Amino acid sequence: QVHVVESGGGSVQAGGSLRLSCAASGNIFSINVMGWYRQAPGNQRELVAQITRGGTTTYAGSVKGRFTISSGSAKNTVYLQMNSLKPEDTAVYYCKARELQVPPRDYWGQGTQVTVSS
C-alpha cells in the first residue's frame, strides 16, 4: 500500500508562481512513476507532468516551459514548480504514484486547489 499527500496549493494572480509538494509513504520502493494531474470543473482529469524513478520527465504541452517537476533525494517526494501561471491553470491538482506491477496500480492524493485570477 502507498499513501499520497499533496500540499502547497492556493490562490495567485496571473503571472505568479506556486510550488506543489507530494509525499508518498508506505511501500515506496515499488513506485516507479510519480506525476501531477489536474481537473478543472467540467473537464476530465489530465496529465500535467510526471517523472520516473530514473528521472525522465514528461510534460503536457500547455505547461511546457512554465512548470517544472522534480523529485527529492529519497524519490518518494515530488515537487511541481509552477511559474507564469494563467487563469486556465485553475484546477484541483492531484498527485499520483504508480506502483511497478502487472497490471500497474495507481495511488492518488486527495487533491489541492490552485486558483489563478486575472
Image: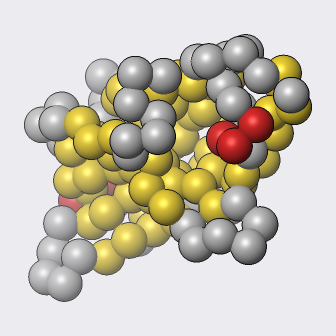
Q: Where is residue 102 in the image (x, y as percent from the top left)?
A: 13, 82
| 70 to 59, vertically: above or below | above
* Residue nearest the viewer, comparing 45 with 33: 45
Q: Residue at 18% of width from left, 32% of height from top? A: 55
Q: How many labels does the image show?
A: 0
Q: Position of residue 54 (x, y in %)?
A: 12, 37
Instruction: State the image quarter where residue 17 is shown.
Output: top right
* Residue nearest the viewer, comparing 3 with 118: 118
Q: Residue at 87% of width from left, 31% of height from top? A: 117
* Residue nearest the viewer, comparing 44 with 30: 44
Q: Residue at 27% of width from left, 66% of height from top? A: 99
Q: Where is residue 9 in the image (x, y as percent from the top left)?
A: 74, 36
Can residue 3 be seen here? The reply is no
Q: Where is residue 64 in the image (x, y as percent from the top left)?
A: 39, 30
Q: Residue at 19% of width from left, 41% of height from top? A: 53
Instruction: State the image quarter where residue 11 is shown.
Output: top right
On the rendered structure, is 68 left or right of 19? left
| 65 to 7, vertically: above or below | above
Can residue 73 be seen here? The reply is yes
Q: Quadrant of the N terminus?
A: bottom left
Q: In which quarter of the image is the C terminus?
A: top right
